[in-house]
Image (tube, rainbow, N blue to C red):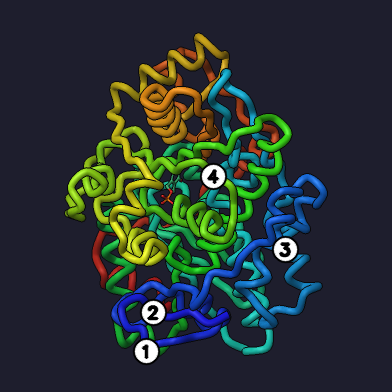
Amino acid sequence: MKYYNLKDKEEVVDFKTATIKGQGKEKGLFFPEFIPQFDNSFIENLNQYSDEEIAFQCMKGFVGDEIPSDILKQIVSETINFEIPLKKINENIYSLELFHGPTLAFKDVGARFMSRCLSYFLKDENKKVTVLVATSGDTGGAVANGFYKTQGINVVILYPKNRVSPVQEKQLTALGENIYALEVDGSFDDCQSLVKQAFSDDEINSNLFLTSANSINIARWLPQQIYYLLALKQWQKLEKQNPVICVPSGNFGNICAGLLAYFRGLSAEHFIAACNENDVVPNYLKSEKLEPKKTVATLSNAMDVGNPSNFVRILELFNNQFEDLKNKISGYSIDDKKTLQTITKVYQEYNYVLEPHSTVAYSALEQYLKENPGKKGFILSTAHPVKFPDAVEKAINLKIELPESLTQLIKKEKKSTEINPDFEELKRFLLK
Ligand SMILES: *Cc1c(COP(=O)(O)O)cnc(C)c1O
């Protein structure tokens, strides 16, 4: 498979190059040259395949022969070596629990696949790579865990001091080895701007081979299709009609992967982009105008994105046909007040604990189903409630138990280096 740069269609690269570089010229995103189709019989009989076989079928067309089949099989089975259950919340709404991985967030899937591909490609290159990433909480943990002890790769994570939850902080700072955490005395935007400067600094780039691990990397984006198939496999055993799929969205990588799977033949009645008050895409779906905004801080902070970078891929999938796009995707914006109310309601009525991101999706899907009676669907539950204890405890006054997998980690010592939001400090650290 070849990938072209959405900003410069002359730039065409293979899977390996796109994975190592992350993005193309002018910061353009890579996009597959064609959309490999699923066989009808495969989609109709998912039930007859193991999860690993489904994951392999899902990815092989995008990787081609750049990774041998036996190794790709190994990579995809490690990518999904945790439970991804579809649970019923009520008569019409199910929850695809994507939070049983090592860092309790759906980002584990993309990070695990990407780290293993990168490590495979770098094995024979004798090249040391530094993955540099800014995080508001979830990305950093998933990336740290995905790349932990990976040969030839160092990971440097910038996070805003005092602005990530205690569990998130331990996931960034307690691993050690090849994972370095920089605690920036500033905001997430400061972290991101430091990272951007590093990518364009000549001195750093002549000394280090830097790459990013954010959701625009195809090796993080594409494997997210896998769990849409695993959801459908479970759905087909429970319901006859096709599901409405509702995705809590920030940078729009996750929903874009679902849409890609749909264009390949995945059965889906409709998609919903569920946003918090950062409502650029819901507004676009109303007005056809994409107007990036300054981000506002919300309870679902991993979705506080004012200029969703993956949206260009969605436009490309739909060939820039607004009417087609609008017929397949609805957008909703849910505020914090509604989010808290919904956490309370879902717990009281259905005894199901939601964290803020998944709640935004629940609320959006509930609204859509009210407007479109007779349909049913599922939300993508993107994080475990224990990662966002403040909001959950505020809404339902319940102490969330730490899953066993984390009790060891939380006891470990935090190791981080504090820096000011000053590029020279970051540079000194990287060149040291
Ligand atoms: C990153 C994240 C999202 C948003 O996913 P996108 O692919 O950026 O749209 C939603 N929920 C949680 C918990 C996240 O960490």
State the SS at label 3: helix
Identify the mark at residue 10; answer none if there is no mark. 1
Q: Which residue is mark 2?
A: 5
Q: Residue at x 68, y 88 (%)?
A: 124
**Disc 2/disc 3 C-alpha distance (Å):** 25 Å
Asked if the residue at tag 1 contacts the one at tag 2, i.e. Cβ–Cβ closer than 8 Å, the answer is yes
Which of the 4 image quadrants contains residue 405? top right
- Place of residue 395 in the rendered image (x, y in percent of width and height, measured from the top left): 40, 17
Upstream in sequence: badge 1 or badge 4: 1
Q: Which residue is mark 4?
A: 268
Upstream in sequence: badge 2 or badge 4: 2
Q: Is residue 197 above or below residue 109?
A: below
- For label 1, being within 8 Å of ligand 1 is answered no
Q: Which residue is mark 3?
A: 56
- Place of residue 303 in the rendered image (x, y in percent of width and height, measured from the top left): 36, 44
Of the pair 394 and 259, the residue shown nearer to us: 259
Q: Residue at x 51, y 67 (%)?
A: 155
Asked if the residue at tag 4 contacts the one at tag 1, i.e. Cβ–Cβ closer than 8 Å, the answer is no
Label 2 vs label 4, nearer the camera: 4
Upstream in sequence: badge 2 or badge 1: 2
**Disc 1/disc 3 C-alpha distance (Å):** 30 Å
**Disc 2/disc 1 C-alpha distance (Å):** 7 Å
The quadrant the N terminus occupies is bottom right
Q: Residue at x 33, y 55 (%)?
A: 184
Residue type at numbered disc 1: Glu
State the SS at label 1: strand
**Disc 2/disc 4 C-alpha distance (Å):** 28 Å
Upstream in sequence: badge 2 or badge 3: 2
**Disc 3/disc 4 C-alpha distance (Å):** 21 Å
